[in-house]
Amino acid sequence: MSRLLFSGGTVVTADGSYRADVLVEDGRIFAIGANIDPEDAEVVDASGKLVMPGFIDGHTHMDMPFGGTMTADDWASGTAAAVAGGTTTIVDFSLQDVDGSLADAIETWRGKSEGKAITDYGYHVAITNLTDEIKAEIPSLPEKGVSSIKIFMAYKGTPLYTEDDDLFEAMQIARDAGVLVMVHAENGDVIAKLQQQALAQGNTAPRFHALTRPEEVEAEATNRAIQLAAIAGAPLLVVHVSCEAALEEVHRAHELGQTVYAETCPQYFAFSYDDLAREGFEGAKYVCSPPLRHEWNREALWRGLQIGDLQIFGSDHCAFNYHEQKELGRDDFTLIPNGLPGAEERAMALWKLGVSEGRLNENQFVAVLSTNQAKIHGMYPRKGALVPGADADVVLWDPELEITATAENRHGNVDYTPYEGMSFRGGPAAVYVRGGLVYRDGEVVGEHGSGQFVERSFEAPGLETRV
Ligand code: URP
Ligand code: ZN
Ligand code: ZN
């Protein structure tokens, strides 16, 4: 039997903060209380640290083909970056092959993750070809431990793009099967038309990525997805909400009592349209979808996190190198692969911009990074909670830790970081997955392949974060 005692720290959960020791036995939380007798346990001094449940990132893209290339991070480098940011579980998008089944996608992703992952992990299936056969396969996902699918309303002209009738039918099927439908909500038809017109006028620079995906394009698709889900009577998760106009649609759905979950991401707080408009081709480093917005959107996004219209904060880690990958779109912004790295910076960015600036408290921080993620992604209370019986996924958060991000000190495999030169105060000092140390003092020490698959099941949790 192995025993570990986190001694003298402040336990921070989604519900509150209190001084307590945390005893771990064989990888699970055994007891939480004041002055626990260490007996034969290995003692970890947590004084001055906040003891938090390991962070969960329900939105990553590791080793995924996209935009004619492969993401720069595979499961080895991507989960190294994740643990360096305090993340102990990821849920990654297994991409359906156009000619393949959903089961094939899961098997392919098993092959990519096994032997490499340092975090625990689950899979969503990202749909690329929603045929009748594939629709009929959706109900078999929960028995494989997969409780969510992602459907893309954007990326017209690629297999990802899905028509409304198929999206709607998938919602009906998912509703009955206990599967959560996640949507990438942007109007693909309008984007395709605006892109065509921009290119015809010789507008090829990275900033046209945002100018051809205006906020209304996201708001319209968000509203449409919400209405389709209402007709289908299905719960819905709108991922990567980037702007006030889209968030208003989510807010309205909540006012009407509809079960709509919504995620936002660090890039929409740390960066803006101005980064896309950087000189030369630098803006390509900031191309993601939905695109970076004007800064004035942030106030609404913070409010969304505060009142619980936005319940989760995922990274949308989808990394491409600047050289040879982002550069594919040097003469045509539509060819720049979409996505940013952010798994490592997700929590530190939220602490810096949210908690340190007084916009969120430490309990809301834990809710959106961990507990709500576990609930929505079907892993609670095994993950996302510090309670007896839960996996001992633990972050020792040091509010005084200082680090300046630069490409050289990142733990992923990307040749740049959009966070270059950004200083953070507050970060993970040590990170544990099921009681095993995976990260300490800037160094990833977890073994590749030590991460385990987490079977998930979805039950449309009511979240208590709204006030
Ligand atoms: O730009 C992004 N977000 N790339 C990843 C794919 C997606 O749509 O989530
Ligand atoms: Zn997306
Ligand atoms: Zn994504």
Image (tube, rainbow, N blue to C red):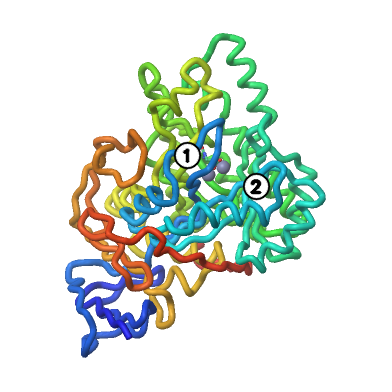
In the displayed structure image, the side of residue 341 where residue 59 appears, left or right: right
Relative to residue 264, is residue 338 depicted above or below?
above
| Label 2 neighbour load within 10 Å: few <14, some 14-19, many 20+ | many
Residue 259 lies, in percent from the top left, at: 64, 60
Residue found at x 47% / y 41%: 318
Q: How many labels sit on residues?
A: 2
Name the residue type under label 1: Thr
- Where does label 2 land, which residue? 96
- Pick the quarter of the image with the N terminus: bottom left
Residue 212 badge: none
Residue hosting label 1: 71
Q: Amino acid at mark 2?
A: Gln
Mark 2 secondary-structure assignment: loop
Q: CA distance from mark 2 to mark 1?
A: 16 Å
In the image, residue 147 above or below residue 30? above
**Of 414 and 196, which appears nearest the observer?**
414
Q: Residue at x 73, y 65 (%)?
A: 177
Left or right: residue 286 versus residue 245 is: left
Please, is residue 281 above or below residue 340 in the view?
Answer: above
> Does the rendering let one see residue 136?
yes
**Residue 467 visible, this orientation:** no
Q: Is residue 368 above or below residue 62?
A: below
